[in-house]
Image: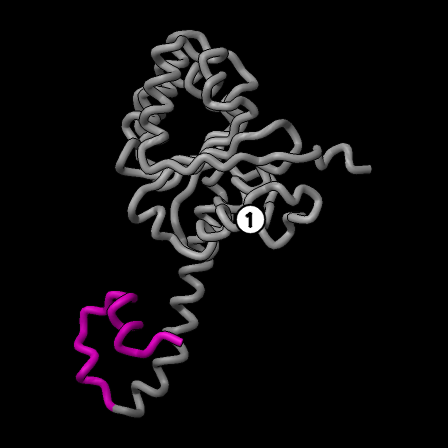
Amino acid sequence: MINLPELWKLLKFASDYNNLTQSQKEILEPILYEELQARELKRIRYLMQRSGIKRIKRIEDFNWQFNPKIPREKIMPFFSSDNWVDEPQNIIFIGPAGVGKSHLADALCYHMITQHGIPTTRITCFDLIEKLKKSRNKYNLLNYYSTVKILCIDELGYVFPNQDQANDIFQIISKRAELLPTIITSNLIPSDWGKIFEAATATAILDRLSFKGTFIKCEGRSFRRKN
């Protein structure tokens, strides 16, 4: 439990904590701790509403036994620490449809919001392109996706953007490079990204994602066909 001096600082009271009597401190501490918890819950609810996460997926619910080749030892360190956010690292999940890439990415986004209070946005590549296409002020939207603390672009490889749309995706990833972490899921191995982007654009995007980036190969059967 956070002690009273820390609570006083976190809740940003202007008065001097040292002027309180001991009895006042004992009365105030549980009240202020409850207030801090309420504020944090409200903040997390707000972050979840803005996150774009449609269905909550937790890492605790992921079936590692179904696809044992998925490298658990490579994935779990991202759940046990937020160092990869403070010292930005990109995470790219690569594998065929149905093996659990989106579950892992969504679970990581959910974990970073609920456990660390970090602003996170999750969006499919299709929805990203559509939002940019329909936006009245594309610059503001590009700026938002370029500056949100964690950005997850799901299902890269299922849509074929035109050159302008590909440039928008590149601009977002380029502006985030070395500053903010980006999570990507794709059904295509990096050498095939030239199938969805013009070759120079694909190379430029991969170059920025690869710097301090971890590519995680997800192999196995589709969860959707296990029954």
Q: Residue 176: x, y in percent? A: 30, 32
From the viewer's perspective, is residue 190 above or below residue 105? above
Q: Which portion, as a residue range, is magenta?
A: 1-21
Coloring applied to the structure: one colour
Residue 128 belongs to the span the image colors magenta:
no
Of residues 93 and 38, the one nearer the viewer is 93
From the viewer's perspective, is residue 180 above or below residue 34? above
Q: Residue furthest right?
A: 227
Q: Quadrant of residue 181?
A: top left
Residue at 65%, 48% in the rendered image: 64
Residue 3 belongs to the span the image colors magenta:
yes
Quadrant the N terminus occupies: bottom left
Q: Residue 119: x, y in percent? A: 39, 45
In the image, is 115 to the left or to the right of 138?
Answer: right
Camera sees residue 113:
no
From the viewer's perspective, is residue 35 above or below residue 202? below
Q: Secondary structure at mark 1?
A: helix
Q: Quadrant of residue 42?
A: bottom left
Q: Residue 55: x, y in percent? A: 61, 41
The residue that label 1 is drawn on is 72
At label 1, counting other C-alpha atoms closer than 10 Å, the crowd grade (few under 14, some 14-19, many 20 or more) is few
Residue at 19%, 69% in the rendered image: 14
Q: Residue 162: x, y in percent? A: 44, 8
Camera sees residue 67:
yes
In the image, is 26 to the left or to the right of 42?
Answer: left
Badge count: 1
Of residues 16 and 178, the one nearer the viewer is 178
Quadrant the C terminus occupies: top right
What type is the residue that disc 1 sits on?
Arg
Residue at 40%, 79% in the rendered image: 30
